[in-house]
Image (cartoon, rainbow, N blue to C red):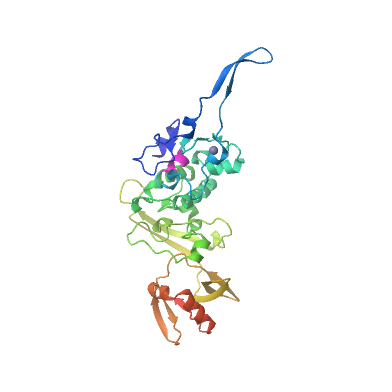
Amino acid sequence: MASIYRDAHLTLAAATSGAATEGFLHYGHLAAEQKLPFWMEWKTHSGQQSTLGARIVPALTTHTPAGDDSPPLSLRGWTLQESKLSRRVLTYTREELWWSCLGESACECGTLDKLQEEEKRLEFNSFYSINNPQEAYKNWYYTVSEYTSRALTNPLDMLPAISGIARVVQDITNSQYIAGLWLDNFIFGLTWQAGTLHTIKSSSAALALSDYRAPTFSWASVERAIYDTIGHWFSANSCTVIETESKVPGRNPLGQVQSASVTLRGLIFKTTLQIEYSFFGIHDISSYVVPCADTKLTFYPDMALESFEAINPDGVTERLSLGHLCSYSILDIAWAAAAGKKPFATIS
Ligand SMILES: [Zn+2]
């Protein structure tokens, strides 16, 4: 798949199509309703024969904004590779055409033309503009964040649908691929989180998939993963990879994974996971803290904790499952905290 996009002179992208079976030319394109471009023979001041042309430029409001109104194409998992692996893309949006290539991005209304270079790079970030491993890893994690917010009809396509990009990253880095992570960048690769900090704090933690898709250390094992590249607390020197193993069911080493494991060496310490309460405005947010020396580290679990022991309001130690945890409403927790009956939990 990677070579098809790479070798194509031009990729036509149907941004309005929600599926491969949908067409896109049946839309009443705004430009089709306009008068034909004006043109006439013309002579310049120096008498040189030329042509004078003019056309109506769509208003800036015709530009499809990012966010909830994003074109259906940008919500489909398999189509991400179109933009990441093509050298030139002509995109048919509902109202106008967009042009993107390694050197330029433009659209009929002029919005893309006016973007700064860095913004243009985000609009069209082809992997063929990358030539060093660190840049390839960084773009891989950006891509995974974007990719995992898209929809896949078949959940087992999670790794195959991005395998074309993985192939290009491997060509650049020459690194071993392990269920969506790279051996030469493995410790950083482990630092994905299921959702943004905001969604983790404001909603219940993500549950593991019922069917096996990838090992739990891989972002591909959950429905949504985000790589936060800012402010990581870890040091790559604090942990080293001893051994890895990855088995695939087919002939594509970058596609589906059958099983995978990793052995790490690093410092660990035993501690207690405590539930702590805080109040912000009208919302009560519970979080965990981990005592560490003279301080306490705040801990927001992005994945559901499977089971733990806790002291109930009567002072009896109980082993609670996830379901029990969910039965604590925010109000119940607030009352428990107000009464000075803060339960604590230990992971075991
Ligand atoms: Zn535009």
- Give the x, y percent position of residue 328: 44, 76
Relative to 28, residue 253 above or below:
below
Q: What residue is at 54 percent from the left and 59 percent from the top? A: 236
Q: Is residue 54 magenta?
A: no
Tell whether 152 sits left or right of 196: left
Magenta residues (range): 79-85
Q: What residue is at 50 percent from the left and 68 percent from the top? A: 300
Is residue 202 in view? Answer: yes
Residue 206 falls in which quadrant of the image?
A: bottom left
Q: What residue is at 45 percent from the left and 50 percent from the top? A: 147
- Depth order, front residue of 324/335: 335
- Give the x, y percent position of residue 146: 48, 50
Residue 219 falls in which quadrant of the image?
A: bottom left
Q: What residue is at 57 percent from the left and 41 percent from the top? A: 120
* Quadrant where the image shows the C terminus: bottom left
Q: How many marks?
A: 0
- Pick out the residue farthest to the left: 249
- Give the x, y percent position of residue 289: 53, 73
Is residue 130 in view? Answer: no
- Depth order, front residue of 239/336: 336
Dominant SS type (magenta): helix
- Give the x, y percent position of residue 130: 53, 41
- Pick out the residue farthest to the right: 45
Relative to 201, residue 214 above or below:
above
Relative to 320, residue 220 above or below:
above
Q: Is residue 80 magenta?
A: yes
- Depth order, front residue of 96/247: 96
Relative to 66, residue 328 above or below:
below
* Quadrant where the image shows the N terminus: top left
Quadrant containing ligand 1:
top right
